[in-house]
Image: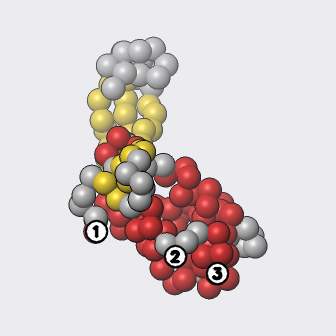
Amino acid sequence: MVCIYCGGKTQVTNSRLQKRLNHVWRRRECLQCHAIFTTEEAADYSGSIVVRSQNGTISPFSRDKLFSSLLQSLGHRPTAVDDAGALTATIVAHLVREHRKPAISPSEIIKIAHITLERFDTAAAVQYAAYHKA
């Protein structure tokens, strides 16, 4: 990785796995200007997971689309954005762990999202089910 300030080479001085979010946090130091900055590495699911609809259409998985639908369902909560982010991370981790296939159906995503929402907030699960049919 190159330094964000001068473009020089960097070295990792500290690294931690964020298991729940499936990210890697790294503290880096530039070997040239000695600036210290933090990076996070996350998997690019849009290139790894595809969604295959019933008519055979294939499209890349969109974490943002999942987040948006969860946020809409959690709109009644004062911490809707934070909750939707955490639930999105939980659902994506479940999809990656349980469905080791490169293609997943929208109904599988909807089912897992609904089950996760039911455990977290029943009202949000009802709202989600009203707009998403598995």
**Left or right, residue 65 beside residue 50:** right
Residue where numbered disc 3 is placed: 126
The answer to whether residue 43 is visible is: no
**Left or right, residue 78 beside residue 4:** right
The quadrant of the image that shows the N terminus is top left
- At horizontal 65% and vertical 62% (from top left) the residue drawn is 71
Residue at far front of view: 55
Residue 81 location (% of width, % of height): 66, 60
Q: Rounded to the nearest whole Å, what is the CA distance between mark 3 and mark 2?
A: 8 Å
Q: Rounded to the nearest whole Å, what is the CA distance between mark 2 and mark 1?
A: 16 Å
115 or 104, nearer to the observer: 104
Category of crowding for the residue at label 3, using alpha-carbon neighbours closer than 10 angstroms: few (below 14), some (14–19), many (at least 20): some
Q: Identity of the amino acid at label 1?
A: Glu
Q: Earlier in the sequence, mark 3 or mark 1?
A: 1
Residue where numbered disc 1 is placed: 98
- At horizontal 44% and vertical 67% (from top left) the residue drawn is 107
Kind of element beneath mark 2: helix
Q: Identity of the amino acid at label 3?
A: Val
Q: Earlier in the sequence, mark 3 or mark 2?
A: 2
Within the image, what quadrant is residue 94 found in?
Answer: bottom left
Residue where numbered disc 2 is placed: 114
Kind of element beneath mark 3: helix
Q: Is residue 62 above or below residue 130?
A: above
- At horizontal 55% and vertical 72% (from top left) the residue drawn is 133
Q: Identity of the amino acid at label 2?
A: His
Residue 134 location (% of width, % of height): 49, 72
Residue 89 location (% of width, % of height): 46, 61
Q: Are marks 3 and 2 in contact (CB under 8 Å)?
A: no
Q: Are marks 3 and 1 in contact (CB under 8 Å)?
A: no
Q: Is residue 41 above or below residue 124?
A: above
Within the image, what quadrant is residue 72 found in?
Answer: bottom right
